[in-house]
Each structure stands twice: as C-alpha cells, then as structure tokens.
Amino acid sequence: MASAAEILLAGALGAIVGSFLNVVIHRLPLGESLVRPRSRCPQCGASIAPYDNVPVLSWLVLRGRCRRCGAPVSARYPLVELLTAAAFAGVVAARGVEDDLALQLPFAAALIALAAIDLEHRLLPNKLVYPLAVYGLVGTAAVDSPDLVEHLLAGAGAFLVL
C-alpha cells in the first residue's frame, strides 16, 4: 500500500513528465526534434522561460496565453500534465511502490502521448509504436516471464483485431 506522500510524489513526477509529453505530442508528428530548440510559443516562436514552464501552474498564471505575444495556448497542455499526474498517482495508489513501477509509469506515459497524438492528428507514429511494442515485450519478459507465451498470444490477438 502506498502512502499519501508517495502518491503525491508520483503525481508531481507525472505532471513533469506530462510537460515533456506535450513536447512529444506537438513535435513528433511534425518530424521535429524533441530536444532542440527549447520550448517555444507556437505563434511567435519566443522561447519559454523556465518559470513559465511549470506544469499546470504557469498555464493558469498566464491565463492560457503566451507571455510575449498574448496568443492563446491550448488547454491541451495543462490537461495532458494533469492526466499524466493522475495516471502516475493512480498507478502508485493501486500498485504501490514496487520494482516494476519503473516499467509501468513510462508505459502509461507513452500511451498518453499516443492517445493525444491520435486525437489531434489521427495518427499513431511508428517512432512511438515500435519502441513501445518492444518495451512491452521486454518488460513483460522481465516481470512475468512464466506467462510470456500467454501474453504474446494476447498481444497477437489484439494486434489482429486492431
């Protein structure tokens, strides 16, 4: 059973990861680098200062607008941060702090990014799907190797249906 502090810490980590997921969601479908340049306003291109890049809070303080040009910033940004925070906190609340948490949280984050990209662009980028499939296989083999064949058959069935 996870303590309240562990759940809150997981939620804070989730909000930070959600901030990076927003970069992935915005840039990956456009074929842009995920690391350079720094975060910037999609309208005026101004770099976003670190104090304006605090998950959820900065969006609220700036009332959903760019500090430099005043252009609206999509509500998707704080929503992804809040969703990721809730997912991380929920996983820790349900599963506790255990060894395979390091496998579960990145998987949850990648699924959030995939869902957001799909909602926005009607696209599931192979640059995320293929590594996520390999990650799932390796993670399953590491955590639940006695049932690996069963998991592979379930995955193959899901692949064929989808």
Image: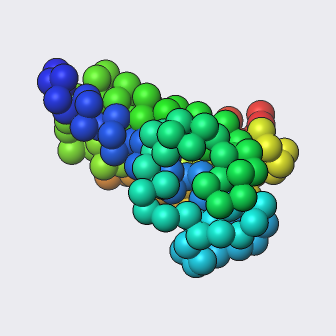
Residue 74: x percent and y percent? Answer: 71, 42
Instruction: Specify whether 59 is left or right of 126.
Output: left
Residue at left offset 61%, top offset 55%: 67
Quadrant of image for the C terminus? top right
Residue at left offset 19%, top offset 23%: 4
Instruction: Specify whether 7 is left or right of 76.
Output: left
Seen as rendered, the residue at the extreme right is 122
Instruction: Specify whether 91 is left or right of 25.
Output: left
Above or below — where is 88 with respect to 62?
above
Camera sees residue 24: no
Image quadrant of residue 104? Answer: top left
Above or below — where is 87 with respect to 57?
above
Residue 60: x percent and y percent? Answer: 53, 36
Q: Nearer the viewer, residue 159 or 125?
A: 125
Image quadrant of residue 10? Answer: top left
Quadrant of image for the N terminus? top left
Image quadrant of residue 128? Answer: bottom right
Residue at left offset 50%, top offset 39%: 61
Residue 75: x percent and y percent? Answer: 67, 36
Q: Nearer the viewer, residue 10 or 136?
A: 10
Q: What color scheme is it?
A: rainbow
Instruction: Specify whether 122 is left or right of 124.
Output: right
Camera sees residue 32: yes
Residue 93: x percent and y percent? Answer: 28, 23
Q: How many marks?
A: 0
